[in-house]
Amino acid sequence: MRIDVRPVARLRGPSPVDVPAALAPLLDALGDTSTDLAQVRIVCDWIQYRSNFAEPVSCRPVLAEHPAARRQAVGQHPEDTLEIALDLRRCGEAELTAGAVKEALGSYADPAAAGRTMLEPWTPASGSCIWRFNALYWQALSGWEQATGREYEQALPGGQSDARQADPVRELISELFRVWDELDARHALPEELYVVELGVGNGNQALTWLDEFAELDRVQGRDYYRRLHYLMGDYSAHVLDRARQAVARHGDRVNTLVLDATRPGLTLGFLRGKAFCVYISNVYDNLPTDELAFLAGRPYLVEVRGYLRDEDAAWIARSYQAEPGDLPGVIERLLRLGPDLLAEAAPGRFPEPAGAVSLWRDVWGALRLAERYTPLEGLDAYQVSPGVTGEILRPLLESSGDIRMHVSNGALASFAGTLPLLHPFGRLLCHDLFVTGPGQYQAGFRGPGKYDGSVVNWVNGPLLQLVGNRRGFDVRIEPFSGRPSATVKTLTAQVRG
Ligand SMILES: C[S@@+](CC[C@H](N)C(=O)[O-])C[C@H]1O[C@@H](n2cnc3c(N)ncnc32)[C@H](O)[C@@H]1O
């Protein structure tokens, strides 16, 4: 049997995590089963997100062959192996852990009796309903914020967006002015100066940026502000509206565009080679991603399946005068219509939109993901993003034994689609949660977690660097200058000089 303990930083210090205490109930329970212990791998994590999709203890089958090629039910195939995952943060108390272990092993032995209301079939994580919930959150943000009484920014690391800090913004704009001055001296500066922001949230970052820009331009007297076109892009019309109001004092220097950040070229193609700065903060970690794993030298795709525990489905259904069996249908309608239209369509159940928001929050809070590892024929059989196969991950996946990592499909597609928009002297600048080396996947939990109603996954920085390097860009990931000790890092990409 193999035991991986990932949160190594928590094994030392004033209150180190008690791994043996968490493992004891599991080892006891395994001793009482007929499971082939040689085929069991235990993975201990510390899930730092208090709100997340995982049970304290869960069983993840490692399938011996692709499900389409097998006749027997999952969990009963003699050649499957088993990963048992423990969240050490929630496995400190022996009795509770023993109960969770019993339940997890029971659900593995007999999935049909696992007491779960399934919301979707098995799917790669990027296709899970969690992303529909995520999109709904941004589309219907005000309803959610009214219900919680707090703004989304308060859920971000540090309690507000780092993008708002004035000093790093001023530094960035000064650098931009320096580049423009040089181009101007060579009569090579275009008349129109384009800056793009993707994923704008409440517009506070844009406001900080534009205020600083206007002030610096006034002081330096370069007249760049008059030539500036600040384009704000987001997939939520609601968010864009809010951001537009936030920057109203900058009038027609600003334009807004509804766009999908994972396909920026579709809407912003007219900017090809023209953007001096593309700015994106706290968005890559919010874009859909799969996970791949290398276990015993073999590649696997992590598949997930959203569910509610039956007891959660029961109380949620009761609260909205529904039967537990009707709940998946009601949730589907919520995701399709949003809370306002759902309330209009079902006034008996939801006299006010607030009732539908309340259902949404209850379901989101209770939503869990089951996971399994499905073998891949080869890394090239897996498509990361258009034109990029899983082969690109080989150097990262093969670097150090058994490993599981995010593919960051959405972030990668966004990044690769943004690079062609850059002016030869332009740069892409991104503040986000970046993993900076594959080893970090073996030393900590990198998502998914829940930030209020949205999903967060750390971004696979080395993968973005590989993709950027191949396209002739220098890609650096450095500490965020406004808060060097923060988990948020700054990625910069510009044409290799
Ligand atoms: C966490 S907020 C970050 C907002 C702001 N940049 C900040 O740092 O505070 C994420 C933003 O990305 C937007 N977003 C998420 N996925 C997107 C996508 N696929 N296309 C466009 N915008 C997206 C959301 O609507 C939201 O405005």
Image (tube, rainbow, N blue to C red):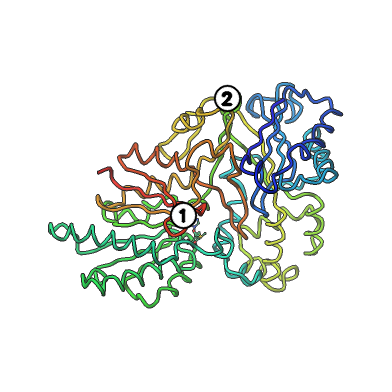
| Tag 2 secondary structure | strand
Identify the residue at image location x=67%, y=66%: 357
Are the residues tagged 2 and 1 within 8 Å (C-beta)? no
Tell me the quarter of the image containing the N terminus: top right
Identify the residue at image location x=75%, y=30%: 75
Q: Residue 298 carries which label?
A: 2
Q: Which amino acid does label 2 sit on?
A: Arg
Q: Nearer the viewer, residue 351 or 26?
A: 26
Q: In this view, does 121 lie to the left or right of 158?
A: right
Q: In which quarter of the image is residue 349?
A: bottom right
Q: Nearer the viewer, residue 265 or 481?
A: 481
* Location of residue 480 with respect to 104 vertically, above or below: below
| Tag 1 secondary structure | loop
Residue 336 in the image, given as x and y percentages of width and height? 61, 58
Identify the residue at image location x=77%, y=23%: 36
Residue 348 in the image, given as x and y percentages of width and height? 75, 70
Q: In this view, does 52 lie to the left or right of 99?
A: left
Q: Name the residue under label 1.
A: 484
Circle 2 or circle 1, nearest the eye: 1
> Which comes sooner in the sequence, label 2 or label 1?
2
Binning the other alpha carbons within 10 Å of mark 1 as few (below 14), some (14 to 19) or many (20 upward) gives few
